[in-house]
Image (spheres, rainbow, N blue to C red):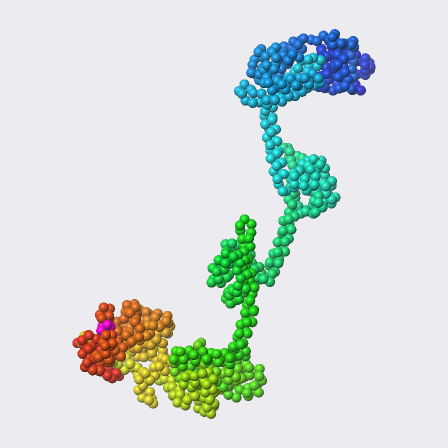
Amino acid sequence: MGIKKVLYVGNNIGLVEALLVTLNGDNEKIPYSIKHILSGNEVVALLGEDNYHYLISEQTVSMLAKKRIKQQFPQLKTLYLNDTPVTPEDLITPSEQQLISDDVKKALNCISIPIYYKNKNNEVIVCNQSFAAHMGVIVDDIIGKNISHFLPCDVKAGLALIDEKMREDRKTHLYECELHDLNGVRREVVFRKQFIDSTDIQIGLVFDVTALNDARRNIEKERMMLRATADISSDLIFFKDLKSRFLGCNKQFEKFIGQPEHKILGKTDEQFFAIDQAIMCQQQDQDVMAKIETYSGEEYLTYVDGERHFIDMKKVPLLDNKGAVQGLIGIGRDITAHHRLQKRLKVANAVFENSQENIIVADQMGDIVSINRSACQLFGVRKSELLGQTVKEVLPQELNSKLFKKLEAEGEWKGDITYHNKLGEIRFAWLDAYVVKLEEGASNHIYSFTDLSQNKNIESKIQFLSKHDPLTGLANRIALFTKLEDAINRARFNETAVAVILIDINRFKLVNDQYGHNEGDKALQQIASRLKNCISEKDTVARFGDDEFVIVIDNLKNEHDAALVAQKVTQEFDHQFTIADIGASLSATMGIGLYPDDGIDADTLLLNAEKAMQRAKGDQRSSYHFYTDQLTQQSSEQLQLEEELNIGIQEDQFELYYQPQYDLNKKLIVAMESLWRWNHPKHGVLLPDQFLSLAEESGLLVQLGLHMLEKVALQTVRWKKANIFFGRIAIHFSASQLEQISLIADIQTIVKESGCSVKDIEFEVEEATFDSHNYTVHENLFNIHKLGIAITISGFGADIPVFHYIEPLGIEKFKIAEDYIQHVPGRLVGQAMIKSVMSLARELGVDVVGEVINSDEQDAFIQEHEISPAKPYHPQPMKVSEATFYLRCHKKK
């Protein structure tokens, strides 16, 4: 092995080169480098700075130095040319000034680090300007002085202890303390002290480590903050190196592994987990670090207690400032509880969705947050239609206020409810409503509905069958007697009548025998349906026997109404029935009993109706009979008259008679009142009271009224063309006419087609009509006024006050009831009524007319109170020709 580096101590460099040749042989040339120093005081320090192969010393080296060299550098080859033993007493120590040359002193001042040299007496022998500045003095002021004079007491004591240790072990020591600079700012410094070899001279360097310590403290603070953050986290946090060895972890990871951090550091996964889990983890680590990608996934890991936990794991590569991978950081979140909760929620949601109970969940504000499938089916809606809506939209309105108050006060409510589903069907349910408290004071309202509709339907069917015939759906015998007794009690209280019509289907047994009972039942259902068409809502039709039915007519006005119903039944049987897909004719016989004439209890009425029915069976002329022959005869005549009335309208057998309304004060005719007459081909001229009620009951009055209005309109045109003054023609309008929706359109059509002026027509309306609750009546009155047709209140004062209609309808006349005119003078009530009406009329600017004046006393009274008689001294109505002649004679002058 050749010599590479040589440390030479001495003054003869040529001697060293010769020695090297001798030591290595003449023929072998080995490159070498020689470090040349003059004194051996620093030989030990120099040997430590480089890897020297040989030490050649021409100068004397102390025994102590040799011993240290041998201990510290056992491989070093030494050659001491002057090997004479040297004792401490014989050792010549160079002077302190010789050790530190002027060049060294100059070089020291170029160094910014404070440096000083001191002797064993603690006196500063050399220092640079930087050190003097730190001590607050100049260099000349500190040289030769004891260094302790310039240091604080605590620093002085600390350095003294260091000096003692250095004298014992001759090693380099560091001492950290605090000093204040010239500006008084506290600085953290480190004294580095060592001896110059083989001397008692110390070299001291002072390093300002304030910034370094601040940075270290900041790093430590951040480290502690990060550590504290990691430790308080419930997640598992750990760090690994490139070989998947643990570099650190938080408290939660320690708990997970079951060991403290210092026992985890440096170990790998297989030392804590099952081998399959460890392989999985390390494979993840290598993928993260090799691909420099973040891993995220869910996995099972076994805790120290042996329990498997579900972990949401994320691993991120750690990179240095050059982008090189140095390891990874892993964060695992134990989602076992969440996972179990999700499973429970899925099960709970499945139970909730598939529960047979109908459940709605709302928040404390009443907004629906959840609804299961059964509830959607119950209410007939989709889930999306209810979510976000309020539960008030589901519950009955009348229940909302009471239910929410009870929930707020007691936390629950129970009871039956009735509601409508989306299709508008009435449904029944039992509702359990209760409050469920949640966290942070919140709550949910649970509404559990038990559908009772089926039970209600069954209950309704039972109730229905208890009162109805199961085949036809009509009232049964029990319900018949109940309703008949109720009708009798009402009639007794209201002093009205009740009719009982017993209907027997003639020879119905033959239908069952010929077509079978099944077809017979179908025929009975058809009969029941037709019978229901013959009555109004207030009346009752019931099945009384196998082929017998009963109709109860409540609040009967007169016997004619009963005959009309019987006639309708007869007409229904005029049409064929479908039996076994074949048209078949059936007939019915009816007996009619009337309360109170034919009996005052249900049994008696039914018995007498049956007797009337038996009598009708023997009379081929009529399908029904009253219990009394007289009523039967009258009914037949009335029905005959109704048929003739219909023919009379078609053949224009009706005409108008006229009576003038004459104003005695103005001495002129103010109107002509039209009166209806029926020129009957058999009975002659019939007055209105002989046919108007029949026309109204049969529904012919509306048609007849329009026919007569058309005659009035045409007559106004004729008289105006003839230049005959007539004022207006008044025509009576009944309530049934005013109830027609098409009335205004019909009036406009007649006015337009006839060419008459609405100013020439006047409608007389009975005072009682204004008390009608029918909206159409009042609407038609207002529209008649808008058309410009005058309205007169007929029978004023006889019934009810109509003052609030006078101004809106533009009433121009009051026609005082006939009773008041006929009994004056002499009757105080009539006189007072007429006077009050006159006073009211003058204030309102309305004319007052009355019925016919039949005496001089009436004339005098009328003149005295300025009343215009309706028909002065003309007791008989006139035909058109007579009225025309009369008007010509009383032409306006």
In the image, is 109 to the left or to the right of 758? right
Vertical relation: 780 (above or below) 525? above
Give above or below for 222 relative to 275.
Answer: above
Residue under the image location 60 percent in, 29 percent down = 217
Image vertical order of residue 566 relative to residue 301, above or below:
below
**Rendering coords of residue 504 (x, y %):** 49, 86
Q: Quadrant of the N terminus?
A: top right
Q: Residue at x 67, y 36 (%)?
A: 248
Image-quadrant location for residue 380:
bottom right
In the figure, 636 relative to 394: above or below? below
Residue 463 in view of the camera: yes
Name the spot of residue 748 as percent of width and height, x first.
33, 72
Q: Is residue 412 left or right of residue 90?
A: left
Magenta region's main secondary structure?
Answer: helix
Residue at image position (77%, 19%) is: 71
Viewer-closest of 797 and 655: 797
For image coordinates 42% across by 81% down, the residue present is 498
The C terminus sits in image quarter: bottom left
Looking at the image, which is closer to me, 230 or 2? 230
Is 458 colored magenta in this rendering?
no
Is residue 359 shown left or right of residue 858? right
Magenta stretch bounds: 834-838
The answer to whether residue 607 is left or right of residue 295 is: left
Q: Classify residue 515 by image quadrant.
A: bottom right
Among the 4 quarters of the image, the one containing residue 596: bottom left
x, y percentage for residue 691?
34, 83
State the image coordinates of residue 730 (x, y, percent, origin top left).
27, 77
Can residue 850 be seen in the rendering of this structure? no
